[in-house]
């Protein structure tokens, strides 16, 4: 009993030390970099057509944000699967945990020193202890809290809190979809474990299999889009889909934004150079006028013998 009380007190203290962060791909990308992972970024998906995602490949995983509601889930939990899965034990950490679920299961991502040590340290832990390890990681918590939002809705709570707030309209939750060892898994920290969704045949693209599954989940949303509300806009109101991809494969919008920033920097440098030249000329004229005035004063003061 005393041990359970201490654990509850520790979790309560941990809950208060994790802030709500913005659900924004730019924020998630910077959070990934703060943790120490390089060469990876998060992009928002507006069109679930496979062709529209071609320029983002390779895609290591999908992050799905949705309004949580209590509903039965009879899908079996996958066992004996070699992947990273952590139970969510703290409030407001589901966004960061969804990101970690993708990074720690991606084969070709350079995790960096901190996250590599974390993965090695927790390799033999059960899901509950992995969740506690995330809670106690100073590096992960500091990176998460550095993007705290001033105001906004509160994201999901732990499983017990989610059950208490089953009727809430403001309960949001993040989950991940990842391909691991030729199979596709849904990783939800509020579940007992990973859920295997499909097996990827040799030579197939895992996105071909997972996108229809996500579309079916979107179709279960209580209200359907109207003629005045496009399907993608409606889905964006109650659900959001983001992908974690290679940093080199930035989309055209980001590329245009970078070019615009570079052009603005060049214009600023040219303007600064012109301003420096003007200031130099003004100073030179001022010095010349001062010297000339001194010479005139000297001539006036000198008297002939």
Image (cartoon, rainbow, N blue to C red):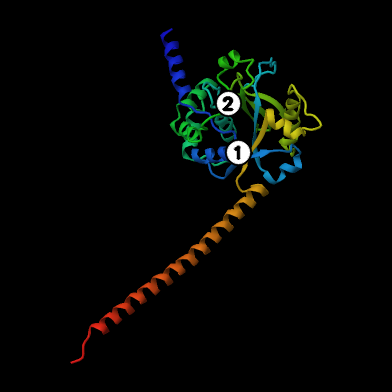
Q: Residue furthest bottom?
A: 305
| Residue 264 appears left or right of 64 | left
Q: How packed is label 2: few (under 14 Cα within 10 Å), some, or many (20 or more)? A: few
At 70% across and 15% down in the image, what residue appears?
A: 74
Name the residue carrying label 1.
25
**Residue 283 or 61: which is nearer the viewer?**
283
| Residue 39 at x, y percent in the picture | 57, 45
Q: Earlier in the sequence, mark 1 or mark 2?
A: 1
At 53% across and 23% down in the image, what residue appears?
A: 91
| Residue 102 at x, y percent in the picture | 60, 33
Q: Is residue 97 visible?
A: yes
Q: Residue furthest left?
A: 305
Vertical comparison of 70 with 211: above or below: above
Q: Quadrant of the C terminus?
A: bottom left
Label 2 near label 1: C-beta < 8 Å? no
Vertical comparison of 244 with 155: above or below: below
| Res 276 quadrant in image | bottom left
Q: Quadrant of the N terminus?
A: top left
Task: For mark 2, give the secondary structure.
Answer: loop
**Residue 109 or 8: which is nearer the viewer?**
8
Between tags 1 and 2, which lies in front?
Answer: 2
Q: Is residue 201 visible?
A: no
**Residue 46 or 181: which is nearer the viewer?**
46
Q: How packed is label 1: few (under 14 Cα within 10 Å), some, or many (20 or more)? A: some
At 43% across and 15% down in the image, what residue appears?
A: 9
Total labels drawn? 2
Vertical comparison of 232 with 249: above or below: above
Task: For mark 1, give the secondary structure.
Answer: helix
Query: CA separation, marks 1 and 2?
Result: 18 Å
Name the residue carrying label 2.
153
């Amino acid at each position: 009993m005393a041990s359970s009380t201490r654990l509850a007190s520790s979790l309560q203290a941990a809950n208060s030390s994790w802030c709500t962060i913005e659900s924004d791909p730019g924020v998630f990308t910077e959070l990934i970099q703060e943790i120490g992972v390089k060469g990876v970024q998060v992009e928002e998906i507006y069109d679930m057509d496979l062709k529209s995602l071609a320029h983002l490949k390779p895609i290591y995983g999908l992050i799905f944000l949705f309004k949580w509601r209590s509903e039965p889930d009879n899908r079996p939990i996958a066992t004996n699967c070699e992947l990273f899965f952590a139970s969510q034990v703290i409030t407001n950490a589901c966004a960061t945990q969804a990101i970690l679920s993708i990074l720690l299961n991606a084969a070709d991502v350079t995790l960096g020193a901190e996250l590599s040590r974390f993965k090695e340290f927790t390799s033999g832990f059960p899901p509950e202890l992995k969740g506690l390890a995330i809670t106690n990681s100073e590096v992960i918590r500091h990176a998460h809290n550095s993007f705290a939002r001033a105001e906004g809705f509160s994201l999901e709570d732990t499983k017990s809190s989610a059950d208490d707030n089953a009727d809430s309209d403001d309960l949001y939750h993040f989950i991940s979809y990842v391909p691991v060892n030729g199979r596709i898994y849904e990783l939800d920290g509020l579940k007992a474990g990973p859920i295997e969704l499909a097996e990827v045949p040799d030579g197939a693209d895992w996105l071909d299999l997972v996108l229809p599954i996500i579309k079916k989940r979107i179709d279960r949303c209580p209200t359907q889009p109207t003629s005045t509300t496009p399907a993608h806009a409606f889905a964006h109101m109650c659900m959001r889909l983001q992908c974690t991809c290679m940093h080199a494969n930035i989309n055209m919008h980001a590329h245009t934004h970078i070019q615009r920033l570079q052009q603005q920097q060049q214009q600023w440098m040219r303007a600064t150079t012109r301003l420096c030249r003007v200031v130099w000329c003004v100073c030179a004229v001022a010095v010349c006028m001062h010297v000339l005035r001194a010479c005139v004063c000297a001539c006036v003061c000198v008297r002939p013998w």
